[in-house]
Amino acid sequence: CAIIEAEYSHTKSLDSETQKIIKEEKATGHITRASVFYRDLNTRQWFGIDDTIDFYAASLLKLPLSIIYFKLAEIDDNILNQKLTLDRVDRNSNEYFKAPETLSTEKQYTVQELIRIMLQYSDNNPVPVLNSSIDQTLRSEILHDLGIESITSNPLESTREISVRIYANILRQLYNASYLNLDYSNTLLEYLSQTEFTSGIMAGVPKGITVAHKFGEATMTNADGAAELRVL
């Protein structure tokens, strides 16, 4: 079929061009390693470049943490209205990309408010209280469902690694509403599409395209996962 052949040729061309760019960036010393996973959500054509290599997850784990709460909300949606208080430790002080909105330690926030701010601004301060306010067995089970395993014995540690393929699959599950229900999937995708971070993958995306993405930074190394939602 000519259409299938054209789709395959287009994906193959993208693969070759991406490998060329990675090779050039390595040669200039701009990067030491890179992983890419591409999947056309309409044709299902895909390619991967070192896409199963694990990277330190850093702030990328905020999305799985959010999914945990919304998965539990499918059983009891009162969990999203539960009010929590932040501790007094500022976990944004050492960040290069700082959250533009400062949360108060003097007031309570609903779980859903904390999740929105955590995803939209990549705010670190909601993470400890959200992590510690859920059943750790359920937390580990849902992370396992998503393909994320701990590399430490402490379930509250953020020392987890993830591959770009696993993270792309998580975004695709939201896009297809195959893990959370449609309303909750759309809510999280909306939060992700409202982020003010315009570097990373957004720097190369033309205006008019809505992108749900989450970036993370660790020792000035950024990771960015993205799912295209709509092309105008």
Image (cartoon, rainbow, N blue to C red):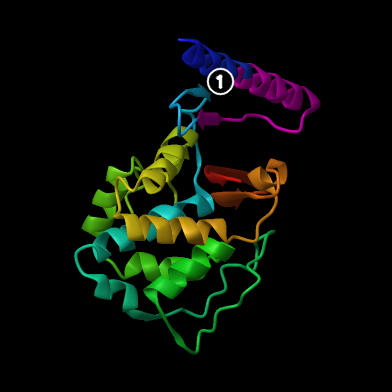
Left or right for 35, reference 45: right
Residue at 27 percent across and 44 percent down: it is: 145
| Residue 21 highlighted magenta (yes or no) | yes
- Residues 111 and 7: in front is 7
Residue at 48 percent across and 68 percent down: it is: 116
Residue located farthest toward the front when viewing the structure as drawn: 2
Above or below for 222 versus 132: above
Left or right for 216, reference 80: right
Left or right for 10, reference 159: right
**Residue 38 visible in this rendered orientation of the protein:** yes
- Residues 182 and 173: in front is 182
Residue 218 pos. (x, y %): 60, 49
Q: Quadrant of the N terminus?
A: top left
Q: Which residue is mark 1?
A: 11
**Residue 155 visible in this rendered orientation of the protein:** no
| Residue range highlighted in magenta | 14-39
